[in-house]
Amino acid sequence: MNKPVNVPDIQKGGPYSHAIVSGNLIFLSGQTGNVPNRVLNFDQQFDNAMEKIKKILEAAGATIGDIVKVSVYLAYNGDLNRMNDLFGRYFPINPPVRTTLVTGFAAEGILVEIDVIAVKDST
């Protein structure tokens, strides 16, 4: 049975769950790092998105060490090298598989969105 996970202090942009736990799999919805009425640079948005991901995973009983797949969506191709540097800080050893795309976003000011799949240890 699928179990929705929502973290009250993380704002959602629509009618969806922050995560769904299905067995030992955890699927997170995309997390952005923008803050309404504030202009944040790429690094700040990336770090904010990753902090949200950590909180959601924690609520689901997991950590970023349980992540097996990451999808990163960038507003600008010019942020790719910086994203690689930041990604390496969060995943310095045995990083998860990753897909990176350059795309547009539904809301203005978003520079990066990240979604992940994690696997909880079943032991």
Image (cartoon, rainbow, N blue to C red):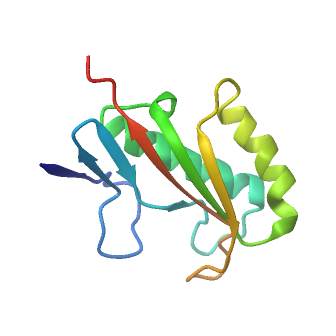
Quarter of the figure that contains the C terminus: top left
- Residue at horizontal 39 percent and vertical 67 percent from the top: 12
- Would residue 21 be found to the left or right of residue 55 on screen? left
Q: Residue at x 31, y 32 (%)?
A: 61
Report x, y in % for residue 79.
Answer: 82, 61
Could you tell me how many numbered marks the image carries?
0
Q: Residue at x 18, y 50 (%)?
A: 3
Height in image: 48 above or below 41?
above
Question: Is 59 drawn above or below residue 19 in the view shown?
Answer: above
From the viewer's perspective, is 67 left or right of 2? right
Judge by depth and name the residue closer to the eye, 41 or 56: 56
Q: Is residue 89 left or right of residue 12?
A: right
Give how far across and how far down residue 105 sits, in percent. 61, 79
| Whole-percent x, y for residue 22 in the image | 23, 46
Query: Residue 20, percent across and down?
Result: 28, 52
Report whether 69 appears left or right of 104.
left
| Residue closest to the far top | 123
Nearer-the-camera pick, 30 or 45: 30
Residue 63 in the image: above or below residue 11 = above
Q: Nearer the viewer, residue 106 or 2?
A: 2
- The quadrant where residue 9 appears: bottom left
Q: Based on the displayed image, in which of its 4 quarters is residue 63 positioned?
A: top left
